[in-house]
Every structure is written in structure tokens, then in C-alpha cells.
Image (tube, grey):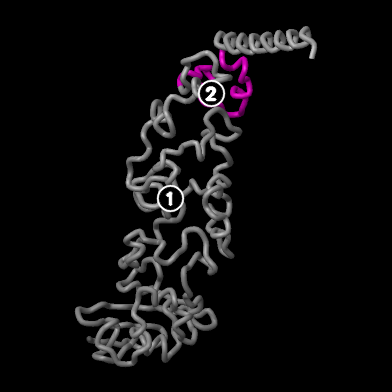
Amino acid sequence: MPRQFIKAAAGAVVILISLTFASAVSAADKPCYQCHPSKLKGDVVHSPVKDKDCTACHNSVGSKHQLEKGLNGVKKSGAALCYECHDNLAKEKSVHAPIKEGDCASCHAPHHSPHKKLLKAAAGDLCYECHDRQKFIKPFPHSPVATGSCLDCHVPHQSAAGKLIKPAKDGICFECHDATIANGKSVHMPVADKECASCHDPHGAGLSKLLKGNYPSEPGAVFSEAAYSLCLGCHEKAAFTESEISSATGFRDGKNNLHALHVKDAGVTCRMCHLVHAAPQARLIRDKAPGKDKVEIIINFTEAKNGGSCKMTCHSPSSYSR
């Protein structure tokens, strides 16, 4: 190879290295956004980026970050950097897993986003980045789930209530549903305890009313355990199946099980006499019920220390004593 060609090639390499080094050095005198203009463009821009204050999050030590990437990396890793400006959001009883792990960037974009709160995707879709969408597809979905409005019931970071449920004075369900359904002389225990999820699936179910089990919808039906699977989740089966009993139900005359007499023998369903949330009489007894041919049945129940008496349109006054 001719000596002149070798000298020319070596000179070209020296010039190229010099230009690269000069470019790296000169970059130190430029504001970040001159080389990274895309970081400033978005519908929602992180405040420090919007203010062109990159050093709020990034180190500014060194001048050759094109060659040595670490020189202009973030000052701290994970949530520790976010907590330089934002409050610590991992202090309550229930903390979202990404927050607990200090991984704010799993949901939020650090520079800009087309979505509010710098979310990486629309709120409903973002949840399904981690949660299995198929588990929430039910024949009867809860309205917020169907519309992707997870934040109607949940908070995204932390909550004093379990499962990231929004803290609510009267329970989260009554933020949307009428709280008067819990008003009455007697209130169903799950309702009184604000445990609506004892009977209803909050996301969706295979049954109407988001019920977790079967509950006869008519005032009359043939008894079966399957038909009463919701009730039997809490109440003892013997209360409805044993003709003679000394426990499991207070609705008995001596050992004669009056619940079984009505439900199993006569095919009268629970809803004929009881309301499910709250009622104007003791023991969740309703004051009136729909009868055959739309004839209204009046129910008058009087509770006694060891039993009670019932007067209905369908039969004369009858008393029982345990």
C-alpha cells in the first residue's frame, strides 16, 4: 500500500476523532432540549420538563454524555426520585403493588403523555396492562368495570381501606347506590356491616344483580340446595330441610321447624316474607308481598321473647314459641 495513502487515512481518522470529541464538548454548552426536543412535546408534559429544568431529575456532571451515558442519568432510582417532589404514597393500609415496589414509571411516563396524570395509557386500559382483562368479562358486569372506570371505586396509589377501595363514610357502594336501602327496623347483617361483597361480586357475575349465588326470583318455587346457594353460603342448610330441629333457626314452634314447613314443604321462597337489605319489621319481615294474580298480601309480624306471631292475608293469626 502506498505510504501516501496510509498517511491520508491516518489523517482522516484523526480529523474524525477530533470532530466527534469537539461535538461532545460543544454539547455541554447547549441546553438539553436543543438535542432532545421530542421530550417537550406532548398533551401533558411533566412540570420540570415543561420548565426546561432537566437537572431537577438528571445529573448535570460531565460534558460527554454522548460517550458516557451515565453522566447524565437520573439522580436517584425509582420512587426515591419521584419523592424528591411528590409525597410518599406508600404509607397506608393498602398500597398498589407498583408503588410498594417503588416503580412509579410502570404507570406514569416521566416526560410527557397524551393522557392525564402522565399515564402511559387511558385509565381503564392501563389497569389491564397488569390485570387479566378476561377475568373481568362477565355476563353481568358492574357498570364501572364495563366502562373501564376502575377509579370510580379504587384509588391508584394507596388507601386506608383494603383492596385500594376509596375510603367512604357510608361504604363505597353507597357512593352510587341509594343508601336508603339500608334503612329499616331490621337490617341484613352484611348490609349493616357494609359488606355488600358478601352477596354481590363487585366486578361482575354470571347472575343478575351481580349475585354470587342463586336466589329464587319468584315468591314460590320448589326447594333445592342449588336454588338457594346464595342463602346457604351463610345460613345452615338444616334450617330449611329438617322438619324437626332444636337450633339453626329461631322460626320454630318447639322443635317443629316452621322455615322448613314454608320453604321445603309449601314451596314458599324467602322473598315471600323477607326483604334482602332492610325491612320495616323485625327479622327482615316485609309488610306486604305480591301474591297470586297480583293480589297484595299484607304481613303483620309481632316478635316475642321466645317466638312471635304472624298475621297474613294468606292465613289467620298464628303464634309460635321456642
Marks 2 and 1, the one that precedes in the sequence? 2
Where does label 2 land, which residue?
69
Question: Circle 1 is placed at which residue position?
Answer: 175
Q: Residue at x 53, y 79 (%)?
A: 294
Q: Secondary structure at mark 2?
A: helix
Judge whether 23 appears above or below 207 on screen.
Answer: above
- Within-10-Å neighbours for mark 2: few <14, some 14–19, many 20+: few
Q: Is residue 284 above or below residue 31?
A: below
Residue at (52%, 65%) from the top-left corner? 205
Q: Judge by depth and name the residue closer to the eye, 185 or 13.
A: 13
Span shown in magenta: 31-56
Please indicate whether residue 316 sits to the left or right of residue 213 in the image: left
Q: Quadrant of residue 98?
A: top left
Place of residue 163 in the rendered image (x, y in percent of width and height, measured from the top left): 40, 52
Does the CB distance between marks 2 and 1 fall below 8 Å?
A: no
Question: What's the amino acid at mark 1?
Answer: Glu
Nearer the observer: mark 2 or 1; the answer is: 2
Residue 195: horizontal and vertical position, in percent?
36, 61
Q: Disc 2 marks which amino acid?
A: Lys
Picture coordinates of residue 12, whole percent (x, y): 72, 10
Horizontal and vertical percent position of residue 61: 46, 15
Q: Quadrant of the N terminus?
A: top right
Give the Cα distance between marks 2 and 1: 50 Å
Tell whether position 37 is magenta.
Answer: yes
* SS for callout 1: helix
